[in-house]
Amino acid sequence: MNCGEGIDTRQIDELFINLDPIQAGGRLTTDAMKAVLAYGDGYSVCDHCTKPFRLDHISKPPLAEFHKDLATFLNMDTARLVPGARRGFQAVADALVKPDDPVLLTAYSHYTEFLSVEQARAQPFEIPANDSHIITPDAAASRIEEVIKTTGKTPALMFVEQVDYQYGNQHPVKDLIKVAHQYDIPVLCNGAYTIGIMEVDGKELGADFLVGSGHKSMAAPAPSGVLATTNEWAETVLRTTGVKGDLTGRTFGVKEVEMMGCTLMGVTSVGMMASFPHVKKRVKEFDAQVRYGNMIVDALLTIDGTQVQSEYPRRHTLTRMNTTDSFDKVAKKHKKKGFFLTSALRERGITGILAGSTRVWKFNSYGITKEQASYVADAFVEIAKAEGIA
Amino acid sequence: MNCGEGIDTRQIDELFINLDPIQAGGRLTTDAMKAVLAYGDGYSVCDHCTKPFRLDHISKPPLAEFHKDLATFLNMDTARLVPGARRGFQAVADALVKPDDPVLLTAYSHYTEFLSVEQARAQPFEIPANDSHIITPDAAASRIEEVIKTTGKTPALMFVEQVDYQYGNQHPVKDLIKVAHQYDIPVLCNGAYTIGIMEVDGKELGADFLVGSGHKSMAAPAPSGVLATTNEWAETVLRTTGVKGDLTGRTFGVKEVEMMGCTLMGVTSVGMMASFPHVKKRVKEFDAQVRYGNMIVDALLTIDGTQVQSEYPRRHTLTRMNTTDSFDKVAKKHKKKGFFLTSALRERGITGILAGSTRVWKFNSYGITKEQASYVADAFVEIAKAEGIA
């Protein structure tokens, strides 16, 4: 089957166990699939849009209710849909940060957080990680002090990742936020790997902003995401337009500047909404998912020369391995070179690891069953044995 | 069927002739529908992403080729996918406009163009329309002169709408751009109602930026759109990141600041791409679509007291009617009040006009067949007769 010209049907998640680091949490649920078909057309959610003409006020489909549910789910005061977590970072940075302001990020901040700072023409400063690849409150405190001393300004914003993209480690966000708040620095907690995957309580964390990704972790189509905030900060980041046509006198109602008005007018919002009841359930089953991830890591660690670079035992399903002294030794002599590993996995119905990687590589086992975890664990050991590693 | 909780299946375009002003050009093609199902999962286009890790470089599905085809289709040097036309406006305004800069818009600029100026903290100035609701080059020239005189600055950017959202009128964009270029003002041509609907030639128009909407006019899911530009301006608006992690030394390759890196990582880009071969064909059939639109307008004009506020004969399928002296007179005495018209239309299988409108209202007949146009034309006359209007 060809869709349009040159687009093959994609069946990665139907035919394989997919361990892709960024794809695991974004697979659609069956309900989302149905919703996507029903709401595929462009502005499909706008049939019953009435005053005040804004996406989060539409009651059919129940987007207004969904926005409220999202805020409750995250224990924040208010929530908006955004076209990807990055657009949430952008909105917050644009609203809070002035040119040349110092902004704190961490050694594990995602490139899109950096881009949001760059777009705001601000100066990024990283909080270093410790040897265990964790961002600690002490490191945050001393970096804040240093930045204030060097720049003469208090940072306008701090980004922290609840779970980072490099190691999949859980960082002490609550304590990091406490430190920032001592200096009156508002904090954006990046939940791209957590919101929709594990339970996230914004008030408990003390976050001023929580940002999640629909296509990364909420079983939603791309681009989608959520920006949640407190009443205090909503006034700034969700301020409504104040601009006026100087000749026509036109004003633009309650459209929000940083949202650029409405955000997800069709398949993306409805996809997120259709998956949401499932997402609410699955975050409660995160512990089991972590156990399955640990089963795979444990199996990998039985292979001579293999190391886990993420915190261990694992507290998230995204994991970074180092197999320089195991699989990479094989790669050096194998006729398929570095591709032997991903090729051997693919033969066993497993995909998602960056093709050719045999030194440092990541996998995300989110969403698999216990049986599949056991199968993947065995597959790695089997491949190692077949290639003569103890 | 319920998708998730409370999401009913939507069958507007299956069961009705839909004249919605903003939905007509965004209905998916069958190929897009298939693609949407195959690529519904979050990051579904990222399976084969390799260096330099950017959406417009992915060759499977053929996004790289699609980006080139889009630029060729618009006769511009380069094109990027964006999450809606508004995100194209935002990118250009952010890249070109400094706080307090004067920016020119028109009396018919869309609210999202205003929001992009507001977000850039700039000052908007409208070019007035003439009595025929057209933005003329003379009006542009005198407004530019006036703004330069008043603010002491040359406007940093000018927005023009090829076809505006209020009247659906075609404005003399080529000549408007010529005027702006005499003052070295770069011009963004808003093609939200044209790109994907009629043939648009960026070089012929002289546009520095062309922005189109996938979900409004390219038979694509929301949010999607295209930003195309020239080699000259690509350096500014598509500049790659220059930011660096100050401790880790991390840099972020060829990610583009104003795009926030990758933009449409799944269903939206593939939906646009699957519809694209059809879109390329349909723009050549625009004249027939305009004829069908005129059939409906002509029928409406036979109804006593009815006026067309858009330019006439119509040159676009989006049309603004004034029925204050016809349908609104009925509404004043009808038991359904203003809802009698949309209700009578709905009984006849026609939908999309704002419920309750009987004075000034818009419709967009894009995508209908000659037979459907004739049916709609007859329906309006029939309703008028049934309510006793001559």
Image (spheres, coloured by chain):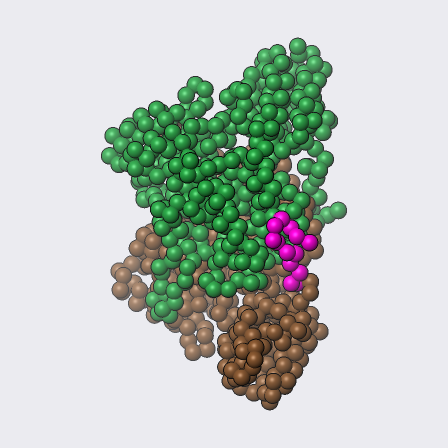
Chain colours: A green, B brown
Q: Residue at x 68, y 23 (%)?
A: A374
Report x, y in % for residue B161: 47, 64
The percent coordinates of residue B213 (x first, y second) are: 54, 57
The magenta stretch spans residue B3? yes
Q: Measured along the vertical axis of the image, is residue B266 above or below residue B374? A: above
Who's the residue at 25% across and 30% down the image?
Answer: A149
Residue A261 to residue A69: above or below: below
Could you tell me which quadrant the C terminus of chain A lies in? top right
Establish if B45 lies above or below B327.
above
Answer whether residue A149 is magenta in the image: no
Residue farthest toward the top in the current orientation of the protein: A390
Kindly indicate the quadrant of the structure image that contains residue A362. top right
Residue B342 screen position, x and y as percent: 59, 73
**What residue sits 67% from the left and 67% below the top?**
B16
- Magenta stretch? B1-13
Image-quadrant location for residue A152? top left
Q: Is residue A289 left or right of residue A159?
A: right
